[in-house]
Amino acid sequence: MWCEFLLPYSPDFNQIELAFSAMKYHLCRSGDYVCMVMTEMTDEELYVTLLRVLYVITPQDAYGWYMHCRYV
């Protein structure tokens, strides 16, 4: 077992920040982000929109984020 020094918080090395960035990118790219801001969506429509964007993210994307953060 070994201890490794971790740097202070950095959004560049945090997988959840990278995932949120990817979700925001896909929302903006598809135009759903503008739709969410400009219209009043029901909770169900909002959840469906976010889930649709979430399903665009692949396991390969997540693996790439772990590689980028040097956890793998």
Image: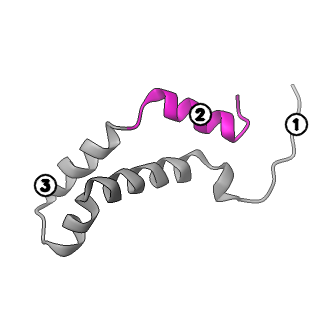
Which circle, 2 or 1, is nearer the viewer? 2
First along the sequence among labels 2 and 1: 1
State the separation of the CA atoms marked 3 and 1.
46 Å
Secondary structure, mark 3, is helix
Please state if 10 lies on the left or on the right of 5 as rendered: left
State the separation of the CA atoms marked 2 and 1.
24 Å
Q: Quickly name the residue at label 2.
A: 64
Secondary structure, mark 2, is helix
Mark 3: amino acid: Glu
Q: Quadrant of residue 27?
A: bottom left
Mark 2: amino acid: Gly
What residue do we see at 81% from left, 48% from top?
Answer: 6
Q: Quadrant of the N terminus?
A: top right
First along the sequence among labels 3 and 1: 1
Q: Quadrant of residue 36?
A: bottom left
First along the sequence among labels 2 and 3: 3
Mark 1: amino acid: Cys
Q: Quickly name the residue at label 1.
A: 3
**Which residues make up the magenta segment?**
57-72
Q: Residues within 10 Å of mark 2 (few under 14, many from 20)?
A: some
Q: Quickly name the residue at label 3.
A: 45
